[in-house]
Image (cartoon, helix red, strand yellow):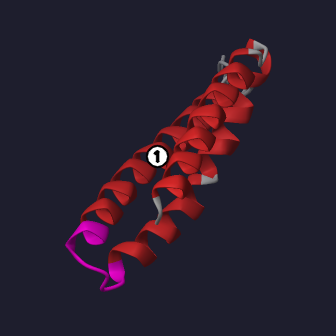
């Protein structure tokens, strides 16, 4: 990768970070939980990609970063499903008392 391509990649990454922060900040609270739980489920795709990278014999750096990506994506998926379960639990009716 040339120096010019690296600088362009860093600029694109920085701009996309700022754009992401602005977009997430403008989501109303009523939509935040459903959107985030769906986005966390998409992390399953990240896990598949990280497994491919960690499993391919490209060197110890790719294996290390692939493993870290797997751990972080699994935490994201588990947290997303926990939040979704808790959110859906709010819509369940309370059990009726027996007399």
Taking the image as drawn, is residue 93 in sight? no
Question: Where is residue 70, by image quadrant?
Answer: bottom left
In-front residue for pair 75/90: 75
Residue underneath mark 1: 78
Furthest toward the left, the residue is 60
How many labels sit on residues? 1
Q: Where is residue 6 in the image (x, y as percent from the top left)?
A: 49, 53
Q: Position of residue 53 (x, y in %)?
A: 41, 74
Q: In which quarter of the image is the C terminus?
A: top right
In-front residue for pair 94/70: 70
Q: Position of residue 24 (x, y in %)?
A: 69, 23
Taking 99 as reference, is 75 above or below it? below
Q: Which residue is drawn at 52% across and 43% down?
A: 10
Taking 67 as reference, is 74 above or below it? above
Q: Which residue is drawn at 59% across and 44% down?
A: 40
Taking 1 as reference, is 37 above or below it? above
Q: Position of residue 89 (x, y in %)?
A: 64, 29
Q: Which residue is drawn at 67% across and 30% down?
A: 20
Question: Where is residue 97, by image quadrant?
Answer: top right
In-front residue for pair 37/43: 43
Taking the image as drawn, is residue 27 in sight? yes
Q: In this view, does 55 lie to the left or right of 42?
A: left
Q: What element carries label 1?
A: helix
Instruction: Mark 1: give few (<14), some (14-19) or many (20+) Cα within 10 Å.
Output: some
Q: Residue at x 34, y 81 (%)?
A: 55
Report the magenta residues as a range: 55-63
Q: In this view, does 34 lie to the left or right of 21?
A: right
């Amino acid at each position: 990768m040339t120096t010019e391509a690296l600088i362009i990649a860093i600029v694109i990454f920085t701009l996309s970070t700022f754009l992401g922060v602005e977009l997430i900040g403008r989501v109303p609270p009523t939509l935040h939980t459903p959107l985030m739980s769906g986005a966390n489920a998409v992390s399953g795709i990240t896990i598949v990609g990280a497994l491919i990278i960690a499993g391919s014999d490209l060197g110890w750096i790719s294996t290390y970063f692939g493993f870290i990506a797997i751990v972080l994506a699994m935490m994201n998926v588990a947290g997303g499903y926990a939040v979704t379960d808790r959110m859906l639990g709010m819509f369940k009716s309370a059990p009726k008392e027996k007399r």
